[in-house]
């Protein structure tokens, strides 16, 4: 009984703190069916999101993660630097997906030019992960990453000719 009262007090506090950010996610009817403990976890995650600073990803690191420009590196040193950088990103729960169609230099350039300067909310805590899909267009996704069902659905929905499905050239095992 005491635990239930504590949960209700926490719930009221969370709802008060969330009032300035009030929107449909807080008033979701599905929350009425949630156990109070789960609802409080959900409200806590919304509050963490709302309060999280939006920072360039390079500034998520201490000191900030600055890497040399891609054109300044020879191929062998670029590959080593790429693997180090991917490990560093993973240490901050930043996961890269759909990278196997890119050469090491192309992926490094994407990290340098697009990912590190990109402003994202940094949310501390376990279970919070930022996935960065390294696909910039639908055709690339359809060619290398969409499975047969996804390809068929896309074709039916858009009534277009699909690109030929191919296996990506650069197989990677990323963390």
Image (tube, rainbow, N blue to C red):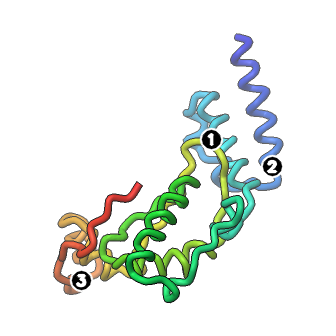
Disc 2 target residue: 19
Crowd tier of the residue under label 1, counting other residues whose Cα lies within 10 Å: few below 14, some 14–19, many 20 or above: some
Q: Nearer the viewer, mark 1 or mark 3?
A: 1
Crowd tier of the residue under label 2, counting other residues whose Cα lies within 10 Å: few below 14, some 14–19, many 20 or above: few
Residue 8 x/y as whole percent: 74, 26
Residue 88 x/y as whole percent: 54, 59
Q: Which residue is located at x 69 percent, y 66 percent?
A: 64
Query: Eyeballing the image, is 65 above or below 44?
Result: below
Nearest to the observer: residue 25 or residue 102: 102
Q: Which residue is located at x 41 percent, y 54 percent?
A: 175
Q: Which residue is located at x 27 percent, y 67 percent?
A: 171
Query: Eyeballing the image, is 131 above or below 71?
Result: above
Tag 1 near tag 3, CB within 8 Å: no
Q: On residue 145, which mark appears?
A: none
Check disc 1 and report its element: helix, strand or loop: helix
The residue furthest bottom is: 71
Q: On residue 42, which mark appears?
A: 1
């Amino acid at each position: 009984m005491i635990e239930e009262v504590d949960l209700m007090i926490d719930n009221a506090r969370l709802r008060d703190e969330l009032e300035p950010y009030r929107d449909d996610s807080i008033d979701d009817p599905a929350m009425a069916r949630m156990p109070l403990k789960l609802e409080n976890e959900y409200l806590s995650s919304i509050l963490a999101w709302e309060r999280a600073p939006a920072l360039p990803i390079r500034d998520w690191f201490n000191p900030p993660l600055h890497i040399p420009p891609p054109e300044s590196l020879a191929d062998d040193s670029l590959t080593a630097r790429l693997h180090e950088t991917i490990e560093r990103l993973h240490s901050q729960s930043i996961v890269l997906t759909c990278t196997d169609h890119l050469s090491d230099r192309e992926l490094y350039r994407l990290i340098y030019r697009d990912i590190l300067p990109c402003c994202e909310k940094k949310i501390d805590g376990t279970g919070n992960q930022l996935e960065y899909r390294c696909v910039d267009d639908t055709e690339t996704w359809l060619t290398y990453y969409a499975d047969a069902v996804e390809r068929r659905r896309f074709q039916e929905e858009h009534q277009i000719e699909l690109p030929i499905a191919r296996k990506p050239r650069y197989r990677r095992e990323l963390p």
